[in-house]
Amino acid sequence: MRIQGGKILTSDGPRPADIVVEGSAIAAVEPQRGGAPAPGDIDASGRWVLPGGIDAHTHFGMPLGGGLASLGWRESSAAALLGGTTTVIDFANPDRGEPLAAAVARWRGMADGRVLCDYGLHATVADAGIERLAEVPALVAAGVPTFKGFLAYKDRLMLSPAALGQLMAAVADAGGLLLVHAEDGELNAKVEAELVAAERTAPRWHPDAHPVESEVHAAVLALDLARQAGCPLMVVHMSAAGTLAALRRAQADREEGGPAALGEVCLHHLFADDAAYRADDERALAAICSPPLRPAGHGAALLAALADGAIDMLSTDHCEFALAIKANAAAAGFPRIPNGCGGVGERLVLSYTLAVCEGRLDPWRWQQVMAERPALLMGLAGRKGRLEPGCDADIVLFDPEARYTWHVAPGSDAAGSLWDGREVTGRVTDVWLRGARAVQGGKLCKAQPGGRFLQRVLDRTRLGSPTDRRIDVDGRT
Ligand SMILES: [Zn+2]
C-alpha cells in the first residue's frame, strides 16, 4: 500500500512524501510519485501524514472499588484511535501487598481482548519494601522498565523520602526510569484537613488542597533524591512554573554528569486553568484532577518549555470518570471525588489548535512531543513514533485546515469533559495500526486490528542526554 500525495512533517515544515507500507511495517518514505493512486493505494492529498500518536500517561478502566472504574479499555482506546493516538502507556497499580508482576498481569487481563490501540504498562510502586524492590529487575526484563512513585496521597500511595530514595536506587540499578508524582502528601493532607474542618468541602475547594508550593517542594525533593541515587527521573504531569524552574536546574546538573531529568506535561495543564473550579458545579467536577488546574499563566510557561525542549512530552493523564460518579462522591466532600479527566482523544487536535495554529509550537516539535520523544524515552524507539522504514505502520492522516466544533468520542461523557463543545482546527481522518486500517473518514472501522501489549526496552544512554536534547531542539533533520 502506498499513502501518496500527503505531506510529512520535517524541520522545514510539511514536506511532500509518499509512504510505502508492506504488511505491518513502513517499507519506505519516498518522494511523491504523483498521478492517480493505484487500486489499494491511498490518496492523502491536502493532508499531513503523521506517525501514530503516543500518549505515555493514561488510566483506562482504572478500578475505584465498589464496582466503579474510569472509562474502560475499549471506549478509551477507541477515543485514542479517533484522536490519532495509536499507542498508550497505562499504569498497573498493585493492591496493598500485591506483587508488581501480579498487578501487571491483572492489568493485562483487563486490557487484552478489549484494547483497540497498542499499549504498554508502567508499574506503580506504593510499597518500597525489600520484596517489592527485588521485583524491579524482573519487570524491566519483562518489558516494564518504567516505574512510578508518589510523594502525594498520604496513607494510600505516598512513599516517604527515604522509601522513594530506595526505589530510585533499585530502578537505577535495574536500568529503569522512574516517574514521580510530585506533590507533598503531608502538606496536602494538612491543608485538606483544615478545609474540611472549616466545612469548605464543595468541589471548588479541591485546588486549595493542592497548593503550587506543594508540587514545587516535592519536585525539588525528588530531583535531589534522584541525583543522589543516580536515577533517571521524569516529573510527570507538571502543572506549575516553579516545578519547571526546578527541572531546568536539574537538567543543568545533567550537563555535569547528573542523571537524566525529564519532564512531562498534560493537555489540561497546558490549555485549561483554575477558572473552571469557579464556574458551575458540573464544570468544577469535570476539572477535578491532581495536580489541579492552575491559575492562568502556568500553562503558557509550560508550553514555552515544551517548545524549547525542557519538557519532553505531551501526555494526557487520561482518567475519565462519568460526571455521575464524581457528583455522587461529591456529596461526601471534595476529598472523596475521584481525580481525573479525559483527553486521550483530544490531545492531537487540541494541541494543534491551541499551540501549533497559535504559533506557540513548531509543527515539527509538535510531532516530536506527541510521538517521537515518548517513543524514545519509553523504550519504543525503532518500532513506534517515527515514519521511517522498519517502524510499525502506525500512521495518521490529518487535515490541517478543517474547522469544526469538538464533540467527545462515543462512549465518553460530554458533561464530564473539559473539552466538549470547543471550536477546533485540524481533523484526524484516517488511522492505521500496524498497517491495518482502524479509522476511516473520521469514523472507527467496524473490523478493528485490535491492540497488543508492548514489551518495552529502554535505551538508557539516550534518556535526556544533553546531546540528545540539543539534537531535539536544534538538529532538525
Ligand atoms: Zn496519572
Image: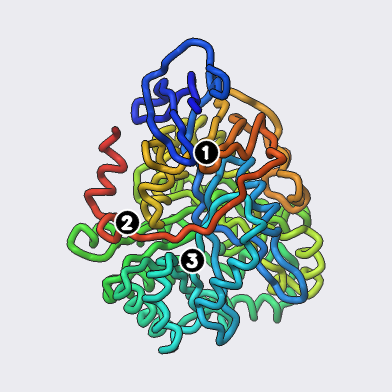
Where does the image place residue 76, in percent across and percent down from the top left? 66, 53
Where does the image place residue 141, in percent across and percent down from the top left? 38, 70
How far, Cα to Cα, is label 1 from label 3? 26 Å
Where does the image place residue 319, in percent across and percent down from the top left? 64, 59
Label disc, if present, on residue 248 of the rendered structure: 2
Residue 408 in view (yes/no): yes
Tell me what residue is drawn at x 50 percent, y 78 percent: 100
User: Which one is earlier in the sequence, the residue at label 1 or at label 3?
Assistant: 3
Label disc, if present, on residue 122 of the rendered structure: 3
User: Which one is earlier in the sequence, the residue at label 3 or at label 2?
Assistant: 3
Residue 64 lies in what quarter of the image? Answer: bottom right
Horizontal relation, residue 137 to residue 439: left or right: left
Question: Is residue 176 or residue 257 the one in the foreground?
Answer: 176
Q: Is mark 3 within 8 Å of ligand 1?
A: no
Name the residue that disc number 1 marks: 435
Residue 475 lies in what quarter of the image? Answer: top left
Q: Secondary structure at mark 2?
A: helix
Question: Is residue 311 or residue 30 the one in the foreground?
Answer: 30
